[in-house]
Amino acid sequence: MTPLTREGIAARVAQDIQDGWHVNLGIGMPEGVANFLPEGRDILLHSENGILGMGPTPPAGEEDESLVNAGKKPITMITGASIFDHAMSFGIIRGGHLELCCLGGYQVASNGDLANWSVTDDDPIASVGGAMDLAAGAQRIWVMMQHNSKNGDKRLLDACTMPLTGQGCVKRVYTDLAVIDVTPEGFLVTEMVDGMTQEELQNRSEAKLRFAEGCGTLPDLTKAA
Amino acid sequence: MTPLTREGIAARVAQDIQDGWHVNLGIGMPEGVANFLPEGRDILLHSENGILGMGPTPPAGEEDESLVNAGKKPITMITGASIFDHAMSFGIIRGGHLELCCLGGYQVASNGDLANWSVTDDDPIASVGGAMDLAAGAQRIWVMMQHNSKNGDKRLLDACTMPLTGQGCVKRVYTDLAVIDVTPEGFLVTEMVDGMTQEELQNRSEAKLRFAEGCGTLPDLTKAA
Amino acid sequence: MLDRRCKSLEEALDGIEDGASIMVSGFGDAGRPNLLLKGLIDKGVKDLHIISNNAGSGFEGLAMLFRHRMISRLTCSFPRGDLGKEISSWVRDGSLTVEVNPQGTMAERIRAAGCGIPAFFTPTAYGTKLGEGKETRDFNGKGHVLETALHADYAFVHAEKADRWGNLMYKNLSRNFAPLMAMAAKTTIVEARHIVELGDMDPNVIMTPGVCVNRLVQWRPVAANEWGIAA
Amino acid sequence: MLDRRCKSLEEALDGIEDGASIMVSGFGDAGRPNLLLKGLIDKGVKDLHIISNNAGSGFEGLAMLFRHRMISRLTCSFPRGDLGKEISSWVRDGSLTVEVNPQGTMAERIRAAGCGIPAFFTPTAYGTKLGEGKETRDFNGKGHVLETALHADYAFVHAEKADRWGNLMYKNLSRNFAPLMAMAAKTTIVEARHIVELGDMDPNVIMTPGVCVNRLVQWRPVAANEWGIAA
């Protein structure tokens, strides 16, 4: 059983993004999704600092300080991009105009609660950025994360223990081990990496998992490429 | 005693508009103020449909259907004008960014209440337009109106009898007979047309008038020109 | 490929049914989406809820939806105009409901709908007939009323330029309610004077990003005899 | 004659006193008003309340106001960064107060201040720590919190182009909070890369009308050794 790499998770998520969607990719693992967007689909990347149609990182030496993403890293614009101010940008988010937002996660609960911004309640520099707006506003939230933390903590929980980013907002979780839908009846596993068993995945999760009838294999699309 | 014409009232108001002010001129008598703005002052006219820097009526045949004022009449743009949408336009109004709005009036009360949008409570097509937003938002409201209605009704009242446009918003009233400040102590007359007496002006008003110590002559500036 | 261009006016208006709520942009003649309104007349739907600043004028555009008796509800700021007498009588006989909003409140309610703000406080209309029955609250010693977001099924917008993704620019005071309505409706339908290539508009000066637009049709002028009722 | 151009940086910053609240536009390096911030350091004011998305980074711009200990209060969405350790220790010793807002809530609060909206409901942060203690209300079965307008004494803005009336254009993602902050502050001070003649900008693509701007100064780059504390 080989867990997916970060790139493997990103590549898998990218497959599910539909032609014509407007998508916000959160800082961290979700940023990597941009590298795997399927050819032939018009997918517009939104960055909360005010752009739709964000393009790839510019070549070294061609950075423009007026072109940065939400993580303050240099970007480019694709043909057909548009620029707007922060009120409009978050109007687009909060008003439900983005078909998708991919966020990193610390914990997801079986009711769709998400914790991804602050590990403890007393961090004096807990930094939320746009995460709560995205959680509250995007049409669907997909969370990308390692199935377990570095020291083995479970992250698919009955209830989040870390400070929440949003209530009941997560629609799907992509981990290095599985793809899990959040349904009214809780977590529903739809894909697992080759060699993973239902028992082991359940052992690595706190919340009760259900498994889809046609639960398939979670492929490593970085190898196929 | 000769009352001012509509143009005379407009010319008098124009004198009091300061260099650099952003001014909304309501439909009707206030529109005429634009024809008397003093030379040498940069005065930016705002129209609530989305422009700062409205210019005069274009010559016949040069109208552009995309350039109209709040009264749907053809306008031009002055050099330095800017265009924006309705949310921004009323943000400018409601946010207190206009130094002045001149409105027509049916009735003004001594506490600054204004009635200028609807004569009766049961008009099925009572039309408010932007009047209430302007009354609530501009830094100062000056009302321009005939001192008495055509059939002699008084219009400077203890309390408005017609539906209100705004509460306590009027700072000054310019009539064909006098200029009247609205103060915490009620109406204070600062100018009267030549030949008008304090007694007669009081007789033509319901609310108690006070008269400024240096109460001067309200000039007919259209004759001087 | 993301392409919001429709092949015909009929396709652009597909699915609009009796009883639909439709935001109609425009202020006076500036930015009035006449082609879409003409298409709606041909479609023959009725019982519409129209949200527009005015009731229209003359024998074209929005006024013709009234003359064809397609409208049963109007949310606006200024119903008075050419059709004042007719509208008054329809209100009196109960065949039309008119809800008057202060213009800025209406604009902000539409913006709020598009931006995910369900309600806001505004000083406008406090202490007036149009504030009656609304929740009030003092802020900084000044009275305010609570206003709610104003949504619609459709928005009709006239643009000067558009590309296939629906990025839009407007000309002068044709902008007015268009960017707000485009965000507030479930389905936004645009008639554009010029449909340009992707990238022809500077990203910095696009006024409505395509994410707010669903369908796009090439504008053409509507002749006086196309409205079905002569002046 | 309406002319918002100042003869010097000092004149542009005249009157700013200890304890002032200042909105600082910019997101990362994009649109950070470095010249105005450098002038503020030279002025030596202290006890400032800064409203800005981030706490700045490196040895320039907003970060230097922290390093010079001029700030006693920060309203932001993302305090973490280069200065994270220092900010944490200042918060712990009580010399700095940090108020974290969700980024979109902060943007909307600033917009509300500029647009005369004293408070609004938003779904963001409902049911989270940042929604605690705030008034809540359900709309359409979904929880919302009441947020209030965020005002300031001053706004610092970096623009690409300006004319003497203060009409502004921004370049790319330098726009971010600038149009909102320019409306929300009592006094808005702009550094502009290019000061152009009135009329040089198309009225349709002006991003901030001059009515929102009070003072204007010609931008110049600030050298690394001008910040007073070396890297």
Image (cartoon, coloured by chain):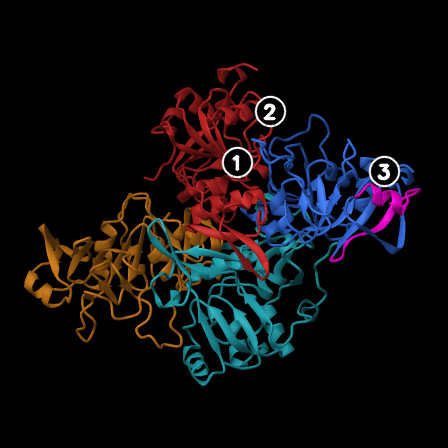
Chain colours: A blue, B orange, C cyan, D red
Q: Which residue is most to the right?
A: A195
Rendered location of residue A92, percent (x, y): 60, 51
- Give the label on residue D82, or none: 2
Rendered location of residue B100, percent (x, y): 31, 51
Do discs 1 and 3 belong to a common subunit?
A: no
- Image marks 2 and 3: residues in contact by CB distance under 8 Å: no
Judge from the rendering whether residue B202 lies leftward or rightward of residue D100; answer left or right. Answer: left
> Magenta includes A203?
yes
Q: Residue at x 44, y 59 (%)?
A: C146
Rendered location of residue D109, percent (x, y): 48, 45
Judge from the rendering whether residue B171 lies leftward or rightward of residue B59; answer left or right. Answer: left
Please give the range of residues in magenta.
A184-205
Judging by the rendered image, the residue that carries numbered circle 3 is A4
D175 up-or-down from A213: above or below = above
B83 up-or-down from C100: above or below = above
Q: Amino acid at mark 3?
A: Leu
Local secondary structure at mark 3: loop
Would you say residue C41 is visible in this rendering? yes
Report crowding for label 2: few under 14, some 14 to 19, many 20 or more residues within 10 A (C-alpha). Answer: some
- Give the label on residue D76, or none: 1
Q: Amino acid at mark 1?
A: Cys
The disc numbered 1 marks a residue on which chain? D
Rendered location of residue B179, percent (x, y): 17, 56
Q: Residue at x 66, y 32 (%)?
A: A73
Q: CA distance from mark 2 to mark 3?
A: 32 Å
